[in-house]
Amino acid sequence: MAPMSQEDLEWFKSTFRPIPKPEIPDDSIDYSLYYIPSSPAPAIIDEVAETRARLVEVQRTSAELVKDLLKDYIWQREGFRLEITKDDGVTSLHGRTNFGDSIEDEWVVVYLLRELTKKHKDVWAKAVDGDGQFLLVEAAATLPAWLEPEVADNRVWINQGQLVIIKPKNDKGRVTEKISLEDARHIITKEPERLMRSTMVQEEAFYRLRNYPKQINENLHSALVTIPRKVAFLLHQKPAYISAAVEAFYLRDPIALRPLRSKDVDNFTFKPEDFVTVSVRFTRVGYAQLKSQDFPVPKAWAEQLPSTDDRKLYDRAEIGMKLSCGFEMLITDPQNQDKSAVREMKLVLEDLETGDEQLPTDKDIETWDKREDDEKWLDISFEDLDRELKGKGKDKEGEAPSEGAFGDANAQENLQRIVAQFEKFLNDDSAGFEGAEFIDDYDSDSDEDDDDEEEGSSDGEDKEASFDEEEFSRMMKEMMGMPSGMPSRSGLQGPPLPSASRNRVQELDSESEDDTEQIQELSKQMEAELRGTGVLNLNRKGNNASGKQALAERSDEGKDEDVLDFEDEDIDVNFAKNLLESLQGQAGTAGPAGNMLSMMGLPIPKDDRHR
């Protein structure tokens, strides 16, 4: 074979593209630990062997931590694990955990990384998820101005339990310098002056870990459920099976439901018989998923549930029915056969059939734990949420609500923190349309900052940066195709209403009866006007005729409105059309159209056109 010419070689190189590394899947956290000694190793020591030995020690420490801190912990999908890998000639420990819907699992991983770096001072860890540098997202309000997402890769590290950020060579102005992993390792060892350790940034980044390790066990929920003895046996063998079963139930599809349609009990792997009431440990997310979903009772289970007269017994049996159906779908669904949990359970079930294993007796079950946790953390009403968002988390007498009145304490504290940060953003004169500008720790002595301090008001708030409800309302109306002035009673644009009517946000925040009556009166006027012009009638044939007819009917009923002779161009239905199209586009979720109707006290019309 003739050798490749230089021209052909250049062409081949131009067509070659390296295979890109796969992106991190959603709901997953990717983490790596590197051994980076602060001082160079003696020449007589093999660096590769030394690095591998130190990483093996980290693996052992990791196993001890998991055993001590996570002995009874249940992961939503995958657990914490570290494997020695070699990428681009660099040996490291790498792991990836899919945490599903349980965000707390992600923070358990971060906590373990911090603990490992505390025990091994020359170990540096970094972690990213599907959103990128999520630790920076947590600390967004405290970051220096130069730290943009485009240049953040390989700059954010955890060492000795602290958050460390690698600064650029020049942090004045916009920073475009990106660094590689090799660059980061060089800076850590050779340029320690570029390592930023900010207490303020670290507190924000690790805020969710403030109650660890105590909070780890609070991520779980124990409940008494009534289930077949075989299911109880599996869960007693390995409580972690619960996550796979709940996910199979929660993500069920028609194929997974096929085995539950059988009326013959003998076709079930977990037959609805021989029931026992045992304490089952769930993840909080899993328990909420199981309990919140409406699920038609399979025919084979129809006669097994007790009467609803005793609500406690019925709830235990209903949760047990859902859980048992989850195990049934998990075992029988073809897409689950490669899961390690399914393979393990099938081996245990085979041992039961051959007699190598025996189901627990009632006497055995009596010795099991009977823990049942309070479910108050599930009780979050819309009124409670709305009160918390408005900063009115106290009862009428001014007393603080009792513990557990609004979910759990951590959820309440996190929500209050989010609201406080949002209010801070609204009153931040450095915030632009693209978001809040980050605090620049390095330009604090600049003239601009001095000017800002002089312009600030005595109470620390810049009045010009305060949230203007009237301007916001006007912008929302224009965006929705609605005239900036409130519609007049004739359906035409008229002079704006008094400021008391325009400032609906302030009226909604007020608790006085007078303001409530004003809102109701305003809502009635707007609803009557929309109905009078016929724009809410989706089946009308003629806009003009329906509008005249409605106004005539209102006049006949003794109302004082004058019936105007509308021309075709006078009746503008663009607002109603845009509003209804916006509602349809929301598909039942939150959006500007629904928010506007809610503020006016109007019910959202149902879309029955496709039924």
Image (cartoon, grey):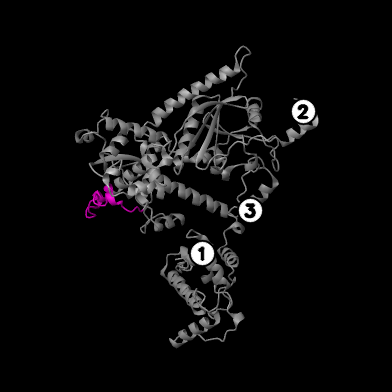
Query: What segment is highlighted magenta in the picture?
Result: 294-317
Whether 301 is drawn above or below 541: the answer is above
Residue 341, horizontal then vertical, whole percent: 39, 35
Foreground pick, 225 / 411:
225
Task: Please tell me whether residue 256 belongs to the stretch shown in magenta.
Answer: no
Compared with 61, 243 (above or below) is below
Q: Amino acid at mark 3?
A: Gly
Give the spatial CA distance, label 1 vs label 2.
64 Å
Q: Mark 3 vs mark 2: which is more N-terminal?
A: 2
Q: Residue at x 58, y 37 (%)?
A: 22
Q: In the picture, residue 325 is in which quadrant?
A: top left
Q: Amino acid at mark 1?
A: Leu
Q: Amino acid at mark 2?
A: Met
Outermost residue, left side: 363
Residue 432 circle label: 3
The structure residue drawn at horizontal position 47% and vertical position 60%, both measured from the top left corner, is: 588
Image mark for residue 4: 2
Report which residue position mark 1 lands on.
583
The mark lying in front, picked from 1 and 2, is 2
Quadrant of the rendering where the N terminus is positioned? top right
Is 299 inside the magenta-drawn segment?
yes
